[in-house]
Amino acid sequence: MRLGKISLTAAAVLAASAMIGVPSVAEAAPVAKAAPAAQPTESCVESDDPEANVYCIYMGTNGTGTYMVTQLSLGDLMLFRNADESVDNPIGLNNNKMYLRLYYSPNYAGSWVCMNPGFIPNTSAYAFNNGPSLGGYGTSIWKNVASATLTGTACGNPIN
């Protein structure tokens, strides 16, 4: 069951940012959607660019609830900051693999986890396991992710 779709285009984000005095960014904006009840990976592969890898952060466990789908590295997850309950990092088209880093703090700071391609239905079972001297180390990632980035570098200490 689809609950609806909220699309944030780059133009809309830039216009809203200008209205509230946020510096503009030259990247496309993430898209917020209502998640289907089953098979979140199928929904997560939706992208304007069929060659792009995307990831999804869901506000519900098992890929349910409203979710964000984006291919961007985001220093602030905005509406989805500290709202993560499940995460999907699907393999892109042409078997293109990207690795997702989820950070405890905004702007890619604090401790982090690295996620291989795959689906994590409940983030409460995982803790920030990289950056032992940084804030958030050992803390559950459930509702504690503030920023995220995709990288082509394989995870050295993956959570999945």
Image (tube, rainbow, N blue to C red):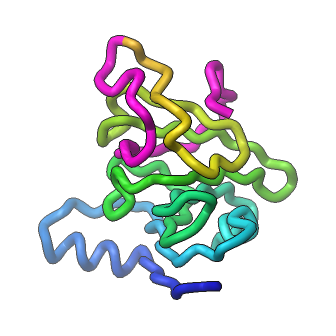
User: What residue is rendered at 36% in x and 43% in y?
Assistant: 144
Position of 120 with respect to 112 (left or right) is: right
Residue 158, compared with residue 148, is above or below; it is above
For the stretch drawn in magenta, the main secondary structure is: loop
Image quarter where the C terminus lies is top right
Residue sitting farthest toward the top = 133
Foreground pick, 42 / 127: 127
Location of residue 95 in the rendering, given as x and y in whole percent from the top left corner: 85, 49
Q: Quadrant of residue 156?
A: top right
- Total marks placed: 0
Residue sitting farthest toward the right = 94
Image quarter where the N terminus lies is bottom right
Location of residue 60 in the rendering, given as x and y in whole percent from the top left corner: 51, 62
Residue 147 within the magenta-colored segment of the rendering:
yes
Position of 14 with respect to 39 (left or right) is: left
Residue 49, compared with residue 52, is above or below; it is below
User: What residue is rendered at 47% in x and 81% in y?
Assistant: 7
User: What residue is rendered at 64% in x and 47% in y?
Assistant: 120
Residue 138, compared with residue 108, is above or below; it is above
Position of 23 with respect to 95 (left or right) is: left
Residue 156 within the magenta-colored segment of the rendering:
yes
Location of residue 58 in the rendering, given as x and y in whole percent from the top left corner: 52, 61
Q: Which residues are magenta?
A: 133-160
User: What residue is rendered at 46% in x and 28% in y?
Assistant: 128
